[in-house]
Image (cartoon, rainbow, N blue to C red):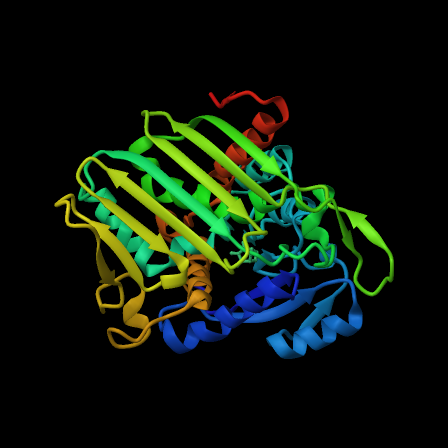
Amino acid sequence: MTDEPIRIGVLGYRFMGKAHANALDRLPMFFEDAPETERHTVIGRDEEALAEAADTLGFSHTATDWRDVVDEVDAFYNLGPNHLHVEPTIAALEAGTPVLCEKPLAPTLDGAERMRDAAREAGVPVGCAFNYRFVPAIRYAKRLIDDGELGEIRQVRGRYLQDWLSDPEAPWSWRNDEEMAGSGALGDLGAHTVDLARFLVGDHVGEAASVSGHLQTFTEQRPVEGEDDDTRPVTVDDAYSAQVAYEDGAMGTFEASRVTEGHKNDHTIAVHGSEGSLEFSLERLNELRVNTGDNRGYETVLVTDEDDPYIQHWWPPGHVIGWEHTFVHENYEFLKAVAAARDDAGDAEAADFSPDFEDAYEVQRVLDAVERSDATGARVNLD
Ligand code: 4PW
């Protein structure tokens, strides 16, 4: 087993770059058995901004071309805009480099399929950064569901609401462009909910069998920052809603929006079974609301006990954790898989990380079906 640190190269250094760099910084302090890492190279286009990012986020090298990096590092983190997910990720995989890629996996189903196929071929650890799977309360919820506490699963309902595009004067960015983003609220936010539903109840209800969906754009043009009187078209959805029929007959109801006034980062998911219900809201990340079917409403469980998932690494019971910790847990699991994979005598199972590209591809199939359903006005079968 090699003791060499895992050298990490990251494409992108803004919001997600910071979230992952922070996670890498926290790991040795709180997760004693985490593999050692080295923040090696940060990749971007603007040399001045890159140098500043390297300094702030603790990377020793910078690069303006991902091609120079993907086979030089031990793990490649693709944290760039969605249109940059496909080619750099496939190149890294062809070089045998493990990849952690931000969500949604790709702007299109075709791109996601190519990434999934490249991952199959490479046989190295891959992950799609659906970080909400790593919330302790979500893991706790999954345990309840898997233990049969809710009985037979009938419904899953999820919403992800933000309001940062509510103002029509909010500036245009790549997230408003179909070529670069693929879709709007659907891929940016809905991907998380569709994945979380699959994580929580997928083993019980199967994959999505059919989907109907609706997309809406409320602001068609947005101003370009720093350029007076210049606007660009918004070519993605501001909001979506969808109904999913799962293979075994359970139903899913999902929505997301980036224009819901008063909702900053409201990601809520509820699961209803024949014996009980549960509900999680990201705005109360340390709690889970549980109903065990006694018709007395919900009780609120505080998920901060030592034996709750990941909690023993942090603080004593009741000392709550936050959004950034989801990235620490995700990086911990991913890097353990990378370390196990490079250990020749290693345990193949330990080298598996989920959610992987197979999982992310299944999510993308649902997103694609929502778009097709909206375009045709018909329900889309996924078999
Ligand atoms: O989880 C969310 C996203 O997927 C984050 O809070 C921000 O909104 C960044 O991208 C989306």
In this rendering, position of residue 320 left or right of residue 89? left
**How far from the left and from the top, in percent, is residue 325?**
42, 67
**How far from the left and from the top, in percent, is residue 216?**
62, 38
**How far from the left and from the top, in percent, is residue 11?**
66, 60
In this rendering, position of residue 17 left or right of residue 322? right
**How far from the left and from the top, in percent, is residue 354?**
42, 48
Residue at image location 87% in from the left, 62% down from the top: 228
Displayed-image quarter of ligand 1: bottom right
Instruction: Kindly tell me whether residue 105 is visible in this rendering.
Output: no
Residue 271 in the image: above or below residue 162: above
Residue 200 in the image: above or below residue 226: above
Residue 165 in the image: above or below residue 185: below
- How many labels, in total? 0
In this rendering, position of residue 285 left or right of residue 257? left
Instruction: Kindly tell me whether residue 205 is visible in this rendering.
Output: yes
Q: Quadrant of residue 139?
A: bottom left
Q: In which quarter of the image is residue 146?
A: top left
In this rendering, position of residue 83 left or right of residue 334? right
Q: Quadrant of the N terminus?
A: bottom left
Residue at image location 79% in from the left, 70% down from the top: 47
Residue at image location 35% in from the left, 39% down from the top: 156
Residue that protrudes farthest toward the left in the picture:
294
Residue at image location 56% in from the left, 33% down from the top: 214
